[in-house]
Amino acid sequence: MKTKNFSLVLATTFLLVILSTTVMALSPGGSIAIVVPSSNAILADNVTIRVNVTSQNIVNCSIWVKSVSTANLTYTQMRNATGQNLWISNSTTDDNLTVYNITIDTFKVEDSNDYTLKAICSNSTLLNVDNLTSSEITGIVVDNTNPATPTSLDPATDTVDTDGTVNFSCSVTDTRTTGCTIYFSQGNPGASTYAMAYAGASCSKELSNIPEQTYAWYCQASDGSNTTDSSANRATIDQKSSANKIPALLQQKGVTSAGGATLSVVGTGNGISFSWLRTPIPVLGELWFGLVIGALVVVIIWAVKLKK
């Protein structure tokens, strides 16, 4: 019985040693590096990526990209025009160097100027799933198309706003846009350009306390490399009440009252209130005027009594 147990232990140990040796032999080891392209390269259409591998056990490689300005926020595996996403080596050199020339279709991702690219190579065996990952190549530009023209500008042209607050917006093609800017080409509410909030297929920018005037404005869509402008719209600010005009007046220099008053801003627990305060000189003038009128009335009454 002891002899059988000893034989079983010996056989098991032998098999484990063989398995361990096989796994070590199939481990990728070595290193990989992307040789082409370099950082800040511009990619378009079908592009060949060259990956150098120093390992005898690697059997395939893949290319991965990501961009914080697009839908590819995390690494996405690239494909060629026919959908292939794994490549075997197509040349081998001396010194245990294997070269992978991998052609990818950049139309599979959105245009942007902030892509990061890396390669992952594997031995693709069930015994060992370790991968080798290259260093990241940053600042890659994918530039295949121009952004589509922004549409559906809001407010519609010749709209009249009566409170000085306007939300400007336009629609864009999400897959061809990474950001938007609003431009004022005729007059401006403080600046000629403003960055717009970009989400999905829409860009928007709300501006408040806009001085009364007619403005011409348009949206510009960008993909990080190219821009496309929309047509221009007009918006008129015509505040109907003086209460609405006060915040806009505060932004302008040299604002005075025709009646000699000054603008007062008072903070309260419920917000801020605005009022015109008379200056001391006009107040005294009105007081003397009242006294004179009162004196005349007294004189007239006294004269009437004397006649009687």
Image: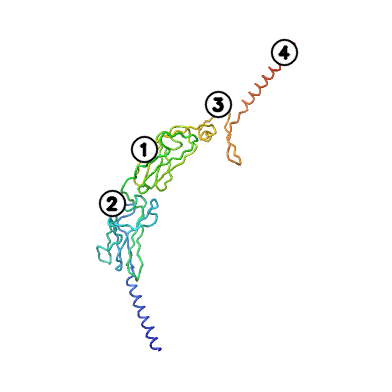
Q: What type is the residue that disc 4 sits on?
A: Val
Marks 2 and 4, the one that precedes in the sequence: 2
Mark closer to the chain start, 4 or 3: 3
Identify whether 249 is placed above or below 181. Answer: above
Tell me the distance, in whole angstroms, between the alpha carbons under discs 4 and 1: 79 Å
Q: Is residue 241 left or right of residue 219?
A: right
Judging by the rendered image, the residue that carries numbered circle 2 is 45
Q: Secondary structure at mark 4?
A: helix
Residue occupying the point 38% across, 87% down: 4
For the residue labelled by badge 1, is the local secondary structure a helix, a strand or a loop? Answer: loop
User: Which residue in the protein does label 1 denote?
Assistant: 231
Above or below 66: residue 95 = below
Badge 1 amino acid? Ser
Name the element at disc 2. Answer: loop
Q: CA distance from mark 1 to mark 2?
A: 30 Å
Mark 1 or 2 closer to N-term?
A: 2
Could you tell which of marks 2 and 3 lies nearer the N-terminus? 2
Q: Tell me which corner region of the image, top left, top right, bottom left or bottom right, holds residue 39.
A: bottom left
Say which label, 1 or 3, has the lower sequence index.
1
Looking at the picture, which amino acid does disc 3 mark? Ala
Label at residue 304: 4
Residue 53 bears which disc, if any? none
**Residue at the disc numbered 3:** 258
Relative to 130, say whether 169 is above or below: above
Alpha carbon distance from label 2 to label 3: 67 Å
Query: Mark 4 and mark 3: span between their CA atoms?
Result: 41 Å
**Residue 276 horizontal/vertical position (percent):** 58, 31
Label 1 vs label 3, nearer the camera: 1
Who is closer to the viewer here, 13 or 240? 240
